[in-house]
Amino acid sequence: MVKGANTGLAVLSEDAESVRVGLSWSSEEGDGDADVSVLLLGDGGKVRGDADFLFYNNPVAADGTVQLLGKTPTDSGSEDRISLDLHTMAPDVERVVVAASRYDDARFGDLNGLRLTVADRTGEDLLGFSIEDASTESAFVFGEFYRRGGEWKFRAVGQGYETGLAGLATDFGIDVDDAEPGAEPEPGADAGPGADTAADAAAGAGERQSVAPVAPSGEGVPAGIAAGPSAVIPAQVAGEIAVPAEPGKEQPVAPPPVRRPRTAKKKVTIPKVTKKSLAENESWRPARLFPVPSL
């Protein structure tokens, strides 16, 4: 297929309700790789929720319709495979986007043989699409499956992003959190969604506060602070805003922080592609030797 072309799966195979998608590439130096991701889009071209973002940290859909099967080595590099059960896909899923991304400063222009293939349930290849114009992109939408007139079709997209997996996911409605685990926000910086800080507490809950424990006889209380039932420990001691505890009244508990998808991933290396010499060309055939004088 060429970029922008589309085709119905039913005309290619009678057994295309479940398909296997393969994304392949190679690296001559063996120092590059990429990872696949799938996004399930509803009305308006956006995901219905974070669970519709399938990638290496979330490889299987809750209903089993999407499974990232992992990488397998090939003669020229590696192939990342995906299983899609289109027949049982939720009715409100209108498009299934198949993409790939690189990390750190790696770009798709450094890889060779970027190609997507689709096979039916029996393993027979139905279509293929190669990307020839990759350059500075760090994420690529290879293609998408979409519903039209009660049947599933495939479109060869070939659209690149220079903002990586996080930029691609954000474009389809995913709120990505790529902060390092345990990292402290810089002074004056926005802590972001789900940050458990006093400022977030005041903004999100209005009057959410936490109560610091008070030592009954002054033990553990810094000098200059009175001990007793109504003693208040400053925020710099307790770590949060502190108020007196009211006897017999249960204090509100802060909700757990919202967890967002993280796209951080360690770099891996694929096997180096061995270039064949002229003598290893498949078109060569063994020759019979004979003495020249016989001519």
Image: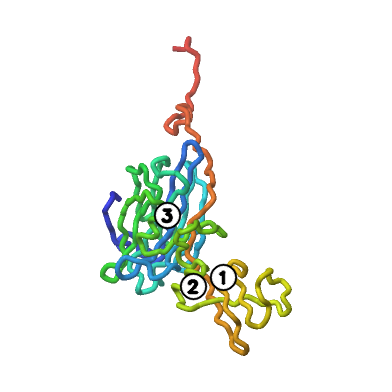
Q: Position of residue 87 (x, y in %)?
A: 39, 70
> Mark 3 against mark 2, which lies toward the viewer?
2
Q: Which residue is depicted at the point 50% across and 35% down?
A: 274
Q: CA distance from mark 1 to mark 3?
A: 35 Å
Tell me the SS state at disc 3: helix
Q: Position of residue 111 (x, y in %)?
A: 42, 41
Q: Amino acid at mark 1?
A: Glu
> Up-down: is 132 above or below 55?
above
Q: Position of residue 186 (x, y in %)?
A: 50, 56
Q: Amino acid at mark 3?
A: Leu
- Label 3 packing within 10 angstroms: few (<14), some (14-19), many (20+): many
Tell me the SS state at disc 1: loop
Q: Position of residue 236 (x, y in %)?
A: 59, 66
- Of labels 2 and 1, earlier in sequence is 2
> Up-down: is 232 above or below 153?
below
Tell me the SS state at disc 2: helix
> Mark 2 against mark 1, which lies toward the viewer?
1
Q: Which residue is depicted at the point 49% across and 57% down?
A: 187
Q: Which residue is depicted at the point 53% across and 75% down?
A: 255
- Label 1 packing within 10 angstroms: few (<14), some (14-19), many (20+): some
- Of labels 3 and 2, earlier in sequence is 3
Q: Amino acid at mark 2?
A: Ala
Of the 4 image quadrants, the one containing the C terminus is: top left
Q: Which of these two is toward me, 256 or 99?
A: 256
- Label 2 packing within 10 angstroms: few (<14), some (14-19), many (20+): many
**Total marks drawn?**
3
> Up-down: is 238 above or below 109?
below
User: Residue 201 has which mark?
Assistant: 2
* Residue 54 picture quarter: bottom left
Q: Residue furthest bottom?
A: 248
Lateral position of residue 213 relative to residue 30, left or right: right
